[in-house]
Amino acid sequence: GEARARVLLAQAQALGVLGKIAEQGEAVRELSALAESMGDPRFAGLAAWHLGTWHGNESRWTEAETAFRRAIAHSIGAGDAELEGQARGSLGHTLRHFGRFDEARAEYECARRIARARGASHSEGRAEESLGTLFGMQGRYAESWACFVRSLDLCHGVGDLEGERTARWFMGLQRVYLGDHSEGRTHLAESLRLAQVLGCRHGEASVMLIMGLSHLRCGEFEPARGQLERCLVLRRELRDRTGESVVAGHLGQLHTALGRYEDAMRFLRVQFEIARETGERVGVALASAFLGPVLGACGDAREARRMFGESIPICRELSLRRVEGYALHGLAVVAAQEGEREEARSLFREALALRRAIGYAPGLAATLCALGGSLIETGDLDAARECLVEARETGHRLAAQDPVVLASCHLARLPGGDGAAAEAELRAREACLGVPARMEAWFLLHRVTGDPDHLARARGLLSHLVEHAPPAAHVPMLERVPLHRQIAVVPPSAG
């Protein structure tokens, strides 16, 4: 029995490295059943840990939690602190996927204490990385970064290449999220190099994902598409359902920027359905927050509000502050489309305060720009100018194209505004703007200059949006979205 168990353990480990999940599952299930019958608590705990890891890779988080708790109980019975720490870290990951963040943090901190007591820098580094990930999800970026730096130092000190790879990836992820793409890409390139050295396909896919996001945020749409589509293929080859969900969400954002709303909805619904199916509440909150703006742009304010209504309570319960800011901003845009100006301004200010509090500069620039435009419509010009100047300055600092151009076009509408300078800004950056932003910018310029060419450009981009929206949305998006209606000059009875 013991000899067979050790063969199965070696097979399970090798198959996991190769990404052969189905074959690994067969070995792990046989190993777990055999180990439980052997009467060796340490080996039974190790087998339970492998079983939990396999369930987690297949996004079966309930089964994973059960297996990891069994691994912890066996490890305590065997007096095996190393295995206990490892199992607690894995349980923390599982609880994090359920959105049970306080419980997850407790497991990570316990794993860190065990590692320090053992003098195991490798394990302590992994625990720091896990805590950094958790803090990052909650928008606690300074605490998160400090954990990643400690993780990298600990792993480098003991030659743990896999730990270095993941620490570099998380550092790159955070820098990209906060708009520092140069430093972010440097960390990601090093993570990719280590993944290739280690033959880690999951690591390669993870780098593709964030490089795709970086290209997207910089308006580099074709490189973004290439990275994300390759990542989606690899995630599916690896049968990584959670990973597939995340990539689908990013592809949905890409197609939103490209003005291809039907494709965007298709990918975002994949993200939403996988997250629902696997019980990953963070994914549900993200997918709902991303779907809301697309539905609003297609003229379905009611369904957009329903999506935001699903996302925001989860965000508040789990302290997903970055995602909450995104959802609040999107809800404010929908409120403005419905003519609910007071509600819109209140929501924009709430999103602004939250994004300032967590230091999320890309979101801050977008919300300042939207609030500034809203304040112009209500005649509060001094406050509008203040918001728009800050939006433009923040956008310049981050090399974020949309807020720079849109803020410049809004500022041109104010007394003393410079329409020629705004047009020069738009023409210089147009290739890096998403289609909706380009459309809005040309229409804002038309309102300043009266130039029919500016209006023609806006109308051409609106035609693109309509052409690539779901057929059922063609009339509502022209009738119910004020910006679209103003550009098209379509009467309410059209269609």
Image (cartoon, rainbow, N blue to C red):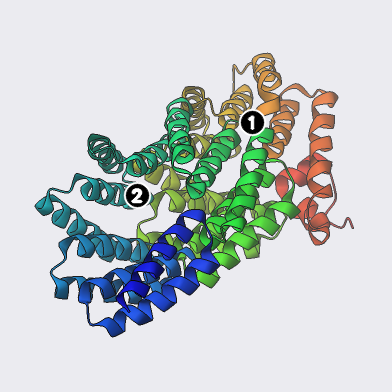
Q: Residue at x 26, y 41 (%)?
A: 151
Whether residue 363 is situated above or below residue 279 in the rendered picture: above
Whether residue 129 is situated above or below residue 153 in the rendered picture: below
Residue 358 image point, x, y percent: 35, 42
The label number, if any, that marks residue 67 in the structure image: none
- Disc 2 marks a residue whose amino acid type is Thr
Q: Residue furthest left?
A: 117
Which residue is the site of mark 2?
133
- Disc 1 marks a residue whose amino acid type is Glu
Q: Residue furthest right?
A: 495
Please say if the residues under marks 2 and 1 sit with CB atoms less than 8 Å apart.
no
Whether residue 97 is situated above or below residue 461 in the rendered picture: below
Q: Is residue 413 left or right of residue 145?
A: right
Asked if one can make out residue 59 in the rendered structure from this viewpoint, the answer is no
Q: Residue furthest bottom?
A: 37
Given residues 8 and 108, the one toward you in this image is 8
Which residue is the site of mark 1?
220
Given residues 121 and 186, the one toward you in this image is 121
Asked if one can make out residue 270 in the rendered structure from this viewpoint, the answer is yes
